[in-house]
Amino acid sequence: MNPLLSRLIKWSQWIAVLFFCGGLFSVYAAPAIESQSRLQSVQDKSVTESLKTLDIGVLAFRGEKDARIKWHETIKYLNSKITDVHFRMQAFTLPQMRRAVAERTVAFILTNPGNYIELEAEYGVSRIVTLDSGRGNETGMRGTIGSAIVVRSDHQNLRTLSDLGGKSLMAVSKHAFGGFQVVWWALENHKIDPFSDLSRIEFVGFPQDKIAYAVINGRVDAGVLSACVLEEMTAEGKIRKGALRVLHPQSYDYFPCKISTRLYPDWPFSKLKSTPNNLAKRVAQALLAMPADSDASRSGGYAGWTIHMDYKPVHELFRGLQIGPYRWMRSTNFQQLWQRYRHWIVIFILSLLWGIWHMVRVEHLVALRTQQLSKVNQDLKTEMDERQKAEERVRSHQSELAHVSRISAAGELASGMAHEINQPLSAINSYAQGTAWRLQAGEMKRDELIEVHQLISRQAERAGTIIQRFRGFLRKQEIVCTDVDINRAIEEAIELFSAEAQKRDVKIELHLAQRLPPVCAEMIQVEQVFLNLMRNATEAMQELDIESRILKIYSEDNGERILVEFHDNGPGISDEVAAHLFDPFFTTRDDGMGLGLSISRSIVESHGGQLVLLEYGKQGLVLQASWPLYQRDVKNEH
């Protein structure tokens, strides 16, 4: 047999054996392969869990839930491209982001450009790629952001940035870039200081959605939202379309959302200083290679990632506001002060020199005139001493005049007083004669005798009280300020005057307020004033019918003063008489001295009070006496 043919036969036999073995393997080894596949999957999962986990911090400006929905696919994409580490997302607020970077609990961060600039200057983070939102133009920046100032659509008085003066504004935080700082810089460029020119500014933190709700509910006049947040909330059905509008809208052909400010570079994806450069390079390559139609891009609402962008506009904003890495500009040196405020410094120095010259001149004039003033003061002291002595003489004369007035009044009251005293004396006489007759007849018992003696004693005390009051009224004494119950003074004055009132057929009606606070006065002099006023009123009503002779006396407390008013029904007076009613020696009666009302006014005024004519006309007068409430010296009471 041909050797070549022999070899071909052997090869065909081996091929047949192999096919037979393959069939047997497919029948009997398939379950084993499937089991091996499941084992490999479990091993892969175990490997993933054993991988080093690295956290990526993401700024959640609309809340953690929204951030996880937006960036979950991006994290998943990175895990699929870099298999030797496991990436995990952490949603942060601004303070949490700063703390995570400071404590190095994250390897990468994704945040707004303003926050990045601050963290770059303070902790050395560096951007590796920049987000491409797909909103930019091809010739300029790709991936741009801004801010929108939103107001209610029915607030027609808010159209421009200048209209915000005196209004309220709500924002995320003073440190939020798109949530406040971009608007802050825009307002400064329009000569508006948000911290002094607005009625109030309120920072509420993330999420920004609650700012839109606050504006709709009327809690604030305007709110700051990052670019496109308004459109996103409207598309999500969270707010009604047209409920809010953008204030001071800016037009950019390539930008789909309405904003109130200029545009700035988009969010950078940055690494911490401690993150290895080779890992950062692999992450950057993976992100730059992400297709625009990937699940991550569609879920995040962006077109992909691009190379570093120019962040000069962000630095200009921070430099203009003197915040972040340019905070040092607020603490300037002398040269900076001179360059900025040299005109004011010159004015200040000139003013200081003028002030020193003026002070020296004033001191010289003061020293020159002190001697003149000393002489004038001495002359004034002498004059004041003489005036004080004259006032003391006047007060002494007024006291004498008041005493004379009381003596005169006593003469007029004497007959009435005699009649009043005669009553208890007659009663005493009757009790004494009756007792004597019954004793002689032997009809009086011991208990009855004691009772009669008690009646005699009470009548004697009554007569003594009348005499004592009359003597006190006539007594001349110094004015002593004591607590005086005005109602009691009125009642005691009426007791003294009651006999004369009965003699003249005058009825006295009292309308006294209860529980009046005391006034600071001298009791006898207050009674003298009331007696003078009652006597004038009764004399004025002598020509009237007896039924019309009514004198009404009122007392009240108006919260500041105690008021006492005397209303009579006598004939009225003219304006001329009213103008001189309180003048000394002015009288309308032929037998009058013209001193009663003048002395009464002097007495009331010496107590710090007033005596005035309230009403006059064709019939009746109303005179009012008032005293201030007694303010005790609390220190002296303790």
Image: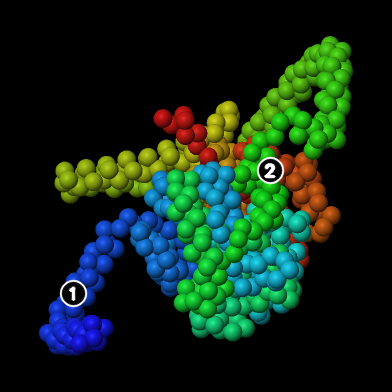
- Whether residue 225 is visible to the viewer of this picture, yes or no, is no
Residue 185 is tagged as none
- Whether residue 455 is visible to the viewer of this picture, yes or no, is yes
Residue at 67% of width from left, 71% of height from top?
136
Residue at 78% of width from left, 54% of height from top?
578
Q: Between 382 and 64, which is closer to the camera in this rendering?
A: 64
Residue 181, by quadrant, is bottom right
Q: Is residue 470 above or below residue 179?
A: above
Left of 106 or right of it: where is 578?
A: right
The residue that disc 1 covers is: 36
Left of 82 or right of it: where is 316?
A: right
The residue that disc 2 covers is: 601
Kindly report which numbered mark, 2 or 1, lies closer to the viewer in this rendering. 1
Q: Is residue 462 above or below residue 147?
A: above
Which kind of residue does numbered mark 1 sit on?
Gln
Q: Is residue 30 above or below residue 159?
A: below
Residue at 30% of width from left, 46% of height from top?
455
Q: Between 583 and 117, which is closer to the camera in this rendering?
A: 117
Residue 76: horizontal and vertical position, in percent?
Answer: 40, 69
Alpha carbon separation for disc pair 2 and 1: 123 Å
Residue 304, by quadrant, is bottom right
Q: Between 368 and 483, which is closer to the camera in this rendering?
A: 368
Q: Secondary structure at mark 1?
A: helix
Q: Residues within 10 Å of mark 1 (few under 14, many from 20)?
A: few
